[in-house]
Image (spheres, helix red, strand yellow):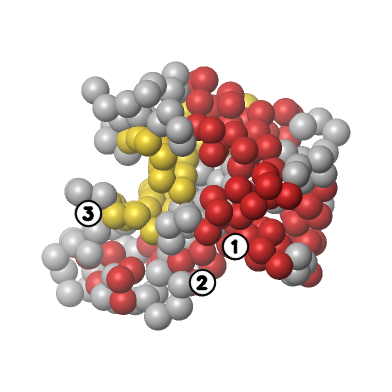
Amino acid sequence: MKRTLAIGDIHGGLKALKQLLKEFQIREDDKLIFVGDYVDGWSESAQVIAYLIDLSKSNTCIFIKGNHDAWCEEWLASGFVNEVWYQHGGKETIESYAGFSEDEKKAHLSFFEAMDMYHIDDQKRLFVHAGFTSMHGVEKEFNVQIFYFDRTLWEMALTMDKRIAKNSALYPNRLKHYKEIYIGHTPTINYFKMHPMNAANVWNVDTGAAFTGRLSAMDIDTKQVFQSDIVKDLYPNELGRNKN
């Protein structure tokens, strides 16, 4: 049976990514949907991008753009170092590119530029890094940066009364457009949860790999969860983003 797996924020943790793919025993007919933030945190950001480019040659992969990816793309394109980015993992990402040729950097830039802001499958399941604000759905969003910075979608879902039916006038209109919504961006460890969280029809698969959590994947049909080890244990001599 073909599987579709949503994979959370990697943040430069190549060891965790390889371990995760081994954990769910990746198959050639798997469809992998990555919800963004491939870089910034652990020391192998450039190596993660190189690995994903190769992976996409053998598997169907969809890459959603995260805010950290947008910052890295800007640096690769122009050399500009966003100060906020530099302090939140950009420094480690820049260092990870030592030894990469200009041609390799250009290939990585093309990879970032080709990323989707969101993906909607044939069952009306939405995949986006952070969220969206338009009550009319992602197609009517006025600012693309909202797709990778918004936290209001998740905060709204968390506060919803579970007794409100989807056909109710009280059910938020922006959630009605999609069967399910898969996001990253806000680590579930902020809520003391080490596994993906569900609120309303929103699933958050960012389980804090950049900090003290694990990298996670979810089979979106069965809701089976696969996880790496705690990522900081795979990089014992690094802080990841825990220093921030």
Instruction: Select label 2 or label 1 by which is in front.
Output: 1
Res. 136 image quadrant: bottom left
The amino acid marked with disc number 1 is Ala
Question: Pointer 2: what residue?
Answer: 145
| Badge 2 or badge 1: first in the primary sequence | 1
Q: Is residue 156 left or right of residue 10?
A: left
| Badge 3 or badge 2: first in the primary sequence | 3
How many C-alpha atoms fall within 10 Å of the one at disc 2: few (<14), some, or many (≥20)? Answer: some
Helix, strand or loop at mark 1: helix
The amino acid marked with disc number 2 is Gln
Tell which residue pokes out farthest to the right in this image: 237
Residue 44 image offset from top left, x and y in percent: 72, 39
Question: Pointer 3: what residue?
Answer: 124
How many C-alpha atoms fall within 10 Å of the one at disc 1: few (<14), some, or many (≥20)? Answer: many
Quadrant location of the N terminus in the rendered image: top left
Tell which residue pokes out farthest to the left in this image: 167
Asked if the residue under mark 1 is in contact with the one under mark 3, i.e. CB atoms within 8 Å, the reply is no
Q: How many marks?
A: 3
Q: Is residue 11 left or right of residue 241?
A: left
The residue closer to the viewer here, 134 or 223, is: 134
Residue depicted at x 74% and y 29%: 233
Vertical relation: 20 (above or below) 239: above
Res. 91 image quadrant: bottom right
The residue closer to the viewer here, 60 or 136, is: 60
Residue depicted at x 51% and y 72%: 145
The amino acid marked with disc number 3 is Lys
Question: Pointer 1: what residue?
Answer: 70
Instruction: Select label 3 or label 1 by which is in front.
Output: 1
The residue closer to the viewer here, 58 or 212, is: 58
Res. 137 image quadrant: bottom left
Q: Is residue 31 visible?
A: yes
Asked if the residue under mark 1 is in contact with the one under mark 2, i.e. CB atoms within 8 Å, the reply is yes
